[in-house]
Amino acid sequence: MVYSVQDILIQLENYGIFEIVLPFLLIFAIVFGILSYMGIFGNNKGVHTIIAFVVGLLAVRLPFFTDFYRELFPRLGIGITILLALLILAGLFFSDQSRSGFMITLVVVAVLIAIVVLYQTFSYLGWTGFGYFGGDSVGWIIGAIIFVALIIAIVLGGGSGGNNSGKGKGGDFPLGAFWVPQGRGYDQYVK
């Protein structure tokens, strides 16, 4: 009997590989890595392993944790695919000087994708209700957070005093919708 890849994945899903084993391994690896990096218990790998094992088992014990992983990672895969497509387009159409400015825009897009992915996951699982306010105000809350983050980015991106018109030494030089930092190969074009 010949099995397709889809049949094998369905069989692995029936065995609980995707709902128990993979989330457990992910949590185990993250906790073990954090404990090893932080060195809270010294270089004792046995203690790190036991703590990571216990945290991993406790995490997969309840179904809402595995439901969260099952809903989050396919959406995250779509978001990463969008970022990859934008990176490919940036490589085709932007020069080296303006590509650094595009990376700032790409970070903003990545944050927006992360917010959308988390909101859709929370919404699917029914975790978006905020008591009296309900799910209608969540969009306004996210919009306000994005607005405040943009204001902070503009204020911090203005440079350190002086002339920020793009022709002085301080600050960044705006290129269309992208910000290209001075001193990275773009100074030759600024007169």
Image: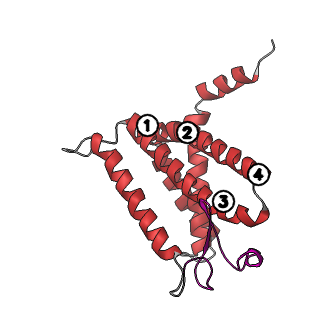
Q: Residue at x 60, y 50 (%)?
A: 26
**Disc 3 crowd, CA 10 A, few/some/many (<14, 14-19, 20+):** many
Q: Residue at x 79, y 50 (%)?
A: 92
Compare marks 4 and 3 and give the one earlier in the sequence.
4
Compare marks 3 and 2 and give the one earlier in the sequence.
2
Marks 2 and 1 close (CB-CB < 8 Å): no
The residue that mark 2 highlights is 75
Which residues, given as a range, are shown in magenta?
164-191
Asked whether 190 falls inside the magenta stretch, the response is yes
Instruction: Name the secondary structure under disc 1.
Output: helix
Residue 93: numbered disc: 4
Give how far across and how far down residue 51 sits, in percent: 52, 61
The residue that mark 1 highlights is 63
Marks 1 and 4 sit apart, C-alpha to C-alpha, by 46 Å
Place residue 176 in its image quadrant.
bottom right
Amino acid type of the residue that numbered disc 4 sits on in the rendered structure: Phe
Which of labels 1 and 4 is toward the front?
4
Amino acid type of the residue that numbered disc 3 sits on in the rendered structure: Phe
Marks 3 and 2 sit apart, C-alpha to C-alpha, by 24 Å
Residue 102: numbered disc: 3
Amino acid type of the residue that numbered disc 1 sits on in the rendered structure: Pro
State which quarter of the image contains the N terminus.
top right
Asked whether 171 falls inside the magenta stretch, the response is yes
